[in-house]
Amino acid sequence: MPDNWGFVLAAYGLAAVVLIGYWRMLVRQESDLEDRSRLAPSSGHLTPGSQTTSARAGERSHAAPISGHPRPKPDSRDPLQ
Amino acid sequence: MWKDLLVEHRSKETLNALFFFALLLLFVFQFTLGPDRERLAGALPGLLWLGFILSGLLGLGRAFVVERENDCWEALLLAPGDKSAIYVGKLAGNLLLMFIVEVMLLVLFGVFFNLDLVPALPALVVVIGLGTVGFAAIGTLFAAMTTQVRARELLFPVLLLPVQVPVLLATVQATEAVLLGEPLGAVAHWLKLLAAADVVYVAVGVLTFDFVLEG
Amino acid sequence: MRVLGAVTVVALAAGLVAGLGLAPREVTQGNVQRIMYLHVPSVWVAYVAFAVVFVASIAYLAKRADAADRLAHASAEVGVVFTGVTIATGSIWGKPTWGTWWTWDARLTSVSILFVMYLGYLLLRGMIDDRERGARYAAVLGIVAAFNIPLVHFSVIWWRTLHQPPSLMTPGPAMPRVIITALLVNFVAFSLLYVYFVAKRVHLLRREAEAAA
């Protein structure tokens, strides 16, 4: 059976790229947050949510940008009004 | 709960539209899979369930839209008593809807593909019944969840389809066996899976619906 | 956190050494089998991650603790990452082994369904602006998805074995101790990585929540 080291390297390389990429995304978001909290002390009027850094699969950044900005949609109507 | 059934009954338009949709699906299946009868015949159980599921996605996706559009949503939230009753009511209504659609599709299939479904009918009813309950149970839950969400028409199938895979696998396998004339005992494991799935899904639906309807 | 990170790196390095160096060349498959040292621990960790999502989801619905919600969210995200790695490495393993990039064998199929289910979870979270509702709905979804895992598992296995003889994904009956050790080392390493990722992600979520408050 041929050794197929190429595939082994590809697999390890891919795994490394994905995992390191995810780690870098986390680190970057963390420093973004720190920057923002240093610059804008209170309600961020010009911060449109953390940069959706399009990392590997963009889906992972879906999780990130639920930062607080005033609810843009009326879909949370107060039922008791 | 009766209110829901009545509403469904009165919304003949949904039913008509779904019937038309089912018919169109048949045409699409025929056109996409070509005139090769053999290939079509082999794929029939799958196509049947594709038809059920696609129609179900459309029908169930709208399950709570009526409430939403008519501002009954708050009324639902404020209703006293166990919210789970609403779930059961909705589920029953959705089941009825789906069964009607399925019957229509079965008849259409039988006509267009010249199938003799009668000998397999009792077994078919069991399989389809079990499968539909599984589909509707989670479908009703997810429909309630996605009504309030952006891009709900997109999110509903996206959430529902992966969860439905076990049910889909089981029903298609069982349907295939049944259509080939095998007794129900031959697919007992699939039926047990379906039954287990149904129990789990309905239980989870009943238990968590309160949380979905909270606000 | 730093300590955890450092320990993780050490463990990962150990795992690499074990997998690539110490473990012997497998008899039937050749060195390609070494990919297993990535693939298997990945999927184990993914399952752990989703189990955590399940527990955290229940905890959130029961106690309404935001920490539980953050844990569920983070664990789901990291779980999806590891599931992705599982699928990718599995596919790369498959190419030289079976000659094809993809095959609908039981394990790859189940894992793919897992991937898509929890990707949907993340999608749901992304699409709900109201944090409280998002947490609630996500918790419900987390519970449904977790109950679905065994159903998926069995249905897919039956689907495969009834159509084809079982595939050769499982390693041979008696695995040499070295291989098992290498697997365990990598498993520990990946688990540490998981913990590190989740901790970081939870931390981020909490900071985001505080910034919004």
Image (cartoon, coloured by chain):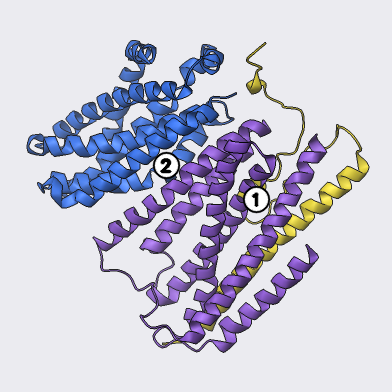
Chain colours: A yellow, B blue, C purple
Residue B160, numbered label: none
Q: Does residue B174 sit above or below C2 in this rendering? A: above
Tell me which corner region of the image, top left, top right, bottom left or bottom right, holds residue B58. top left
Residue at the spot x=47%, y=48% of the render?
Answer: C146
Name the side, left or right, on which C53 lies relative to B21.
right
Residue C74, numbered label: 1
Residue at the spot x=58%, y=37% of the render?
Answer: C62
Which sits in the foreground, A54 or C62?
C62
Q: Residues within 10 Å of mark 1 (few under 14, many from 20)?
A: many
What amino acid is found at the position of numbered circle 2 in the picture? Leu
Mark whose residue sits in front, 2 or 1? 1
Which sits in the foreground, A51 or C60?
C60
Which sits in the foreground, C102 or C80?
C80
Furthest toward the left, the residue is B119
- Residue B203 in the image: state x and y as whole percent: 40, 35
Tell me which corner region of the image, top left, top right, bottom left or bottom right, holds residue B137. top left
Which chain is home to disc 2?
B
**Which secondary structure lies at badge 1?**
helix
Give the position of the N terminus of chain B as an image quadrant: top left
Q: Is residue B61 visible?
A: yes
- The residue that label 2 is drawn on is B161
- Residue C165 in the image: state x and y as whole percent: 26, 68
- Residue C158 in the image: state x and y as whole percent: 28, 58
What amino acid is found at the position of numbered circle 1 in the picture? Ala
Name the side, left or right, on which C120 lies relative to C165.
right
Residue at the spot x=54%, y=12% of the render?
Answer: B71
Name the side, left or right, on which B53 lies relative to B76.
left
- Residue B77 in the image: state x and y as whole percent: 54, 18
Which sits in the foreground, B68 or B210?
B210
Name the side, left or right, on which C5 lies relative to C161.
right
Q: Does residue A3 sit above or below B48 in this rendering? A: below
Q: Does residue B158 sit above or below C171 in this rendering? A: above
